[in-house]
Image (cartoon, rainbow, N blue to C red):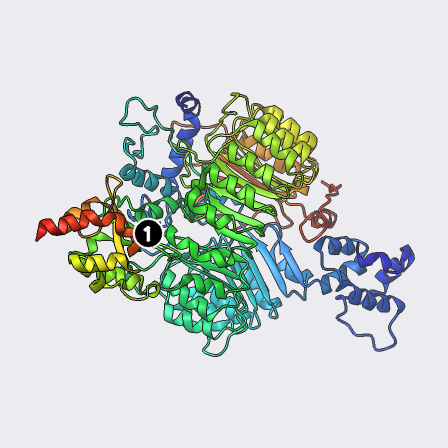
Amino acid sequence: MAMISEEHSKEKLGFEETELRLGLPGGGGIVNGDFGKNTNANGKRGYPETVNLKLNLSLKETEKGENLQKEKNLISCSNNAVKPPTKAQVVGWPPVRSFRKNVMAVQKSNSEEGVGGTATFVKVSMDGAPYLRKVDLNMYKSYQDLYGALGKMFNSFTMGKCDSQGMMDFMNESKLKDLLNGSDFVPTYEDKDGDWMLVGDVPWEMFVGSCKRLRIMKGTEAIGLAPRAMEKCKNRS
Amino acid sequence: MSEDEELPDLGGGSTRSSNSTAVSGGGGDHNYVSPSPDQVLENVLENVLCFLTSRRDRNAASLVCKSWYRAEALTRSELFIGNCYSVSPRRVTNRFRLVKAIAIKGKPRFSDFSLLPPDWGAHFGPWLSAMSRSYRALEKLYLKRMSVTDDDLSFAAQSFPILKELVMVCCEGFGTGGLAIVASGCREIRVLELMDSDVGDDEADWISCFPDNVTCLESFVFDCVEAPINFEALERLVARSPSLKKLRLNCYISIGQLYRLMIRAPQLTHLGTGSFSPLEIVAQGEQELNYFSAFAACKSLICLSGFREIIPDYLSAIYPVCGNLTSLNLSYANINAEQLKPVICLCHKLQTFWVLDSVSDEGLQAVSAACKDLRELRVFPVQALEDAEGPVSEVGLLAISEGCRKLQSILYFCQRMTNAAVVAMSKNCLDLVVFRLCIMGRHRPDHITGEPMDEGFGAIVKNCKKLTRLAVSGLLTDRAFSYIGQYGKLLRTLSVAFAGNTDLGLKYLLEGCPKLQKLEIRDSPFGDSALFAGLHHYYNMRFLWMSSCKVTRQGCEEIARQLPGLVVEVITRDREENETSEYVDTLYMYRSLDGPRADAPRLMVRPSLMICGKHCTSTECRFSIARSLDFTLSVWVPCISR
């Protein structure tokens, strides 16, 4: 790859100068750093060539080991000495229109990796429901808050007891037994170790940190998980 | 087959006599005695000609004799201008008087990839001026890669009171303010479609500008408009548009809002779903809407797109319509194979599928297994970079070729490919008309054998006998072009980038492909001698584009000298004082009846300029050029008087 870079450095020279010298009407250079939308001050898109530079900016944030391509520096270098230097991006290549190039930026901001954000999105499934939901655990301060939200979310799928009261009930040992033997729903979660646990066992903050996904399952199916919970109930009281 | 064959044979005699008794002005004077036989014939002709709709048939009819030329000009109602600079608006409106529908294309396609400066041209203004005087009954306006201002839109709304269809593709220069004027001014509008266009956000509430009464809207497409809209106004608009069949929303429409629109318009056939994710503020605790049932209620839905900011979990809501879909566009949805599979396995009627390479080869295998009727596939890259990891490869291409035998059109972006897979596709998909393969790394060979990609593309042109459009990539030698020249006899559009070794490559093309209309080449080592090899053919072409090749200014000037009917535009970019290049940066040339354009942008003043040979003014020359333009025959008869 590096060899090809050198072979074509002459062409790249031409292109880089192109990028710089053909100015925007009424001014030039890189427009504002909102990399989701390529707009300049009056709302129109800036000269699309700047997209290449901006994409490199966003890549810097999200991909480790790539340096920002400086305007005058034609060959971008990598922090990682082992990786060969990436080729400078050529104008208009690959031939993808600029509005398609924003896809990655948009998707990353929605992903559950939560790059740069403080969201902790986890999937929530409920047995019998046709599709999943997602909740941001950081939005809630306690189990009660969470139960309230889950209850509202899945209201249409339950015959009743999946509400905050129902979920609170299983904190009480005797009610827990009743619940688990009935057809009501209980919330469970998968923790970092891959184990399925009943929600409510550990302190809230610890739960938020260790919960990977939630599943609201039928009480009868949760029985295997129950002994642990009952044990914990005993330990608490 | 055309109706011409049933017309009486006029013979040479009557043609001459019709000339001598021709009513001047083509019917302007009225003859109050009983009309001559020639006039009767002309009236008959006019009435018959309205059955000719194909422009190629009409071109043929117009060349029979002057009488037919006149009759045809008076009865042609649909115009297609493939290059807005090939002919002046005045010339068009002088010839064709009764135009109801016009399509105008402007910039060359490579302008989409930032290879032309802004303000390059293709202004709609001059066309609008001429049409506003002559075509007040215009009903349909289609613009592609044109520069359109808000003032233009305003003037158009005033000038064409019965405008029914306005479609703008890859246009720019206007904003939501202009759209507001269209919405309020074009009272008969049935089709308003904005596609892949750059629309400025003037913060105008244009949706509210539609008239309050029931509308005749049938198609409303604004998915490319990157500006928030007044949702309540949109909801009311949809509610009072009972004929609405196509609706494509922009990314500012949340899934909850989509739901509300869908339950108001279950008759939709084409739906662009907007962002397909919830508004952030109500994401938590939002009463769950039954999106599944909303889709289930749209029993006529055959085309789905959008998914601009999709939360993949919601994708299952579309299950109820998958079985009816003929077109699905997921090219903004960053989903993986596992997320795609449950959807695609239901889409057994799918003919058109656009997707991101995030679904990987495995996702494409699922497509191949499920979509046996697939005609068009486009696979776009999530990361449009040369050195990115590529989730799709020859594996996906091979799978598609084996499962989707009826494939006619493919656009495939990838990081690695093999000749074997391309050859396999050439043998499996014999109906291919469009083959566009973009191996994103420049000069990348077959990643298994290390060979150039010559054999693969050679097999495509050889085996796919219906091929008219081809885009090549990867490491290619002159041999690839010899194959294309040898076998690409129906090829009309060819796109070349970073390919070839010597002038021979381009020579093979220009000498071998008689139907070539549009040739765009970048960063390939073709020079003047190759350029001269096409002198016999350039008047037959819509355009030739060559950027970052080895063409010199002298070469361009020589072409212009030898072919006075061509406009030769040259862009040489600004350089430092001590830096010179013997080569021009961009050559864009096209035939034109009206010589070089006057509206070259300020930025192109010096040192770039427009070259044109001495503008030919003789009528024979002009007539023979006219025969080659898109609204006449495409066969060029060389001008004799030079």
Task: Please state which of residues B633 and B65 is positioned toward the viewer in this rendering.
Answer: B633
In this view of the protein, which residue sits in the foreground, B425 or B414?
B425
Quadrant where the C terminus of chain B lies? top right
Q: Position of residue A156 (x, y in %)?
A: 34, 65
Q: Secondary structure at mark 1?
A: loop
Please state, as top left, top right, bottom left or bottom right, where the N terminus of chain B lies in the image.
bottom right
Is disc 1 surrounded by few (<14), some (14 to 19) or many (20+) residues within 10 Å? some
Residue ID for mark 1: A40
Which residue corresponds to the image point at 42% horizontal and 46% vertical from the top-left?
Answer: B339
Q: Is residue B607 visible?
A: no
Closer to the camera, B462 or B589? B462
- Residue B537 image offset from top left, x and y in percent: 68, 37
Which image quadrant for residue B468?
Answer: top right
Residue at left offset 8%, top offset 53%: A237
Task: Name the residue at 50% across, 31% down.
Answer: B523
Q: Nearer the viewer, residue B33 or B233?
A: B233
Image coordinates of residue B352 in percent, x first then y, are 56, 49
